Image (spheres, rainbow, N blue to C red):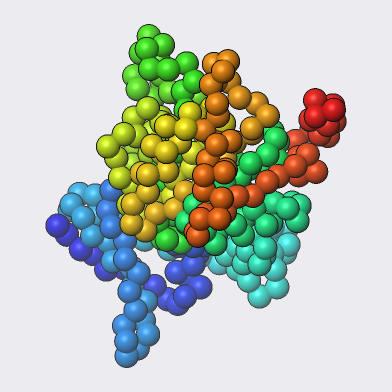
């Protein structure tokens, strides 16, 4: 193992290099397979970035970081972009997140709840180890769950994110699909992928997936697993049986939390099979540490016509 030390000027430069909530730091750790540690000398207060790992990887990572620092320290050109930056703030430093925001996406877009009910949903996720988001399509239940998972990951509340969905067609049909494991489950998990792509971009998503920072686990493969220090998102839970949802809920390990989402009005289970999500709402009612939050057509943030369709079907 090799360790290199890179000196930083001040906290502002650390934010510029490491990113808000250490987002860039995690990306560099994933890209170069090294450990990055921000340290501060107790007497002088000087900041340093320690790069630790195999010699070859440390060398590449340190070279990239030093190049990034040189670019950040270079005088910014006086152009339209620099004029539009906030007064007194260098153009490469992003403005702080608004107090009610969940996350800043890779393209700078702020991810936040758009309705009062969605804000209560986010608060339920952040305040409970197990939260259920139940509501119709387009209400943001999965999107906001993913945003909360990424926020927990980037703020180091958890070490990884686990994504799961039931494969309604059952194991035997999954085995006949072409490709490797990820290619087989891709059609079922694509909506979760889309949420991650919009927030961290495809490249970072793939890097974190390859490094097992983001793990994809179809529900059928959860048996025997325990997820410690993880943020688990179980999507489309209306398509689980009672046994399946119990299997998922009992995977929680130390330092972990889980969000379960579903739309009880759209169940793809075989006729006569009760939805586990519907039954667990009664079983876990009143259990400490568990929150159930219901979203409605008023929270739909897709095309305005979606809200009308939901109302029409409800009638």
Quadrant of the frame with the C terminus: top right
Q: In the image, what residue occupies the spot 47% across and 48% down?
A: 258
Q: Residue furthest top?
A: 176
Number of numbered discs: 0
Q: Is residue 172 left or right of residue 155?
A: left
Image location of residue 49, percent across then percent down: 33, 68
Is residue 159 visible to the viewer in this orientation of the structure? no
Q: Is residue 34 left or right of residue 25?
A: left
Q: Residue furthest bottom?
A: 43
Image location of residue 218, percent across then percent down: 40, 29
| 314 or 66: nearer the viewer | 314
Quadrant of the frame with the N terminus: bottom left
Q: In the image, what residue occupies the spot 47% across and 56% down?
A: 129
Position of residue 162 relative to residue 53, above or below, is above
Image location of residue 122, percent across then percent down: 62, 55
Position of residue 214 relative to residue 240, above or below, is below
Q: In the image, what residue occupies the spot 31% across and 83% down?
A: 41
| 173 or 143: nearer the viewer | 173
Q: Is residue 172 left or right of residue 286?
A: left
| 119 or 50: nearer the viewer | 119
Name the image quarter holding residue 214. Answer: top left
Q: Residue furthest left?
A: 1
| 181 or 205: nearer the viewer | 181
Is residue 302 visible to the viewer in this orientation of the structure? yes
Image location of residue 16, percent across then percent down: 50, 64
Q: In the image, what residue occupies the spot 33% across and 74% down?
A: 39
């Amino acid at each position: 193992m090799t360790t290199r030390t890179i000196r930083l000027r001040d906290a502002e430069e650390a934010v510029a290099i490491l990113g808000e909530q250490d987002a860039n730091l995690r990306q560099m750790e994933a890209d170069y397979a090294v450990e990055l540690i921000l340290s501060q000398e107790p007497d002088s207060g000087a900041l340093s970035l320690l790069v630790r790992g195999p010699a070859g990887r440390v060398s590449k990572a340190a070279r990239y970081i030093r190049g990034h620092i040189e670019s950040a320290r270079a005088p910014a050109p006086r152009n339209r972009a620099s004029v539009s930056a906030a007064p007194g703030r260098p153009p490469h430093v992003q403005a702080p997140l608004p107090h009610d925001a969940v996350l800043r996406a890779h393209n700078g877009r702020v991810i936040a709840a758009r309705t009062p009910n969605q804000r209560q949903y986010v608060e339920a996720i952040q305040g409970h180890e197990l939260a259920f988001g139940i509501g119709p399509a387009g209400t943001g239940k999965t999107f906001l769950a993913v945003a909360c998972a990424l926020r927990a990951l980037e703020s180091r509340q958890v070490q990884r994110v686990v994504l799961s969905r039931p494969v309604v067609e059952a194991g035997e049909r999954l085995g006949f699909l072409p490709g490797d494991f990820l290619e087989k489950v891709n059609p079922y998990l694509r909506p979760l992928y889309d949420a991650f792509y919009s927030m961290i971009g495809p490249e970072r998503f793939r890097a974190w997936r390859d490094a097992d920072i983001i793990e994809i686990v179809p529900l059928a493969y959860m048996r025997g697993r325990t997820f410690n220090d993880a943020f688990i998102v179980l999507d489309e839970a209306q398509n689980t049986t009672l046994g399946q949802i119990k299997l998922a809920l009992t995977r929680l390990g130390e330092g972990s939390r889980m969000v379960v989402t579903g739309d009880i009005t759209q169940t793809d289970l075989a006729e006569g099979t009760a939805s586990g999500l519907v039954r667990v709402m009664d079983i876990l009612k009143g259990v400490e540490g568990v929150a159930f939050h219901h979203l409605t057509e008023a929270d739909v943030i897709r095309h305005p016509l979606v809200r009308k369709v939901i109302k029409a079907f409800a009638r």
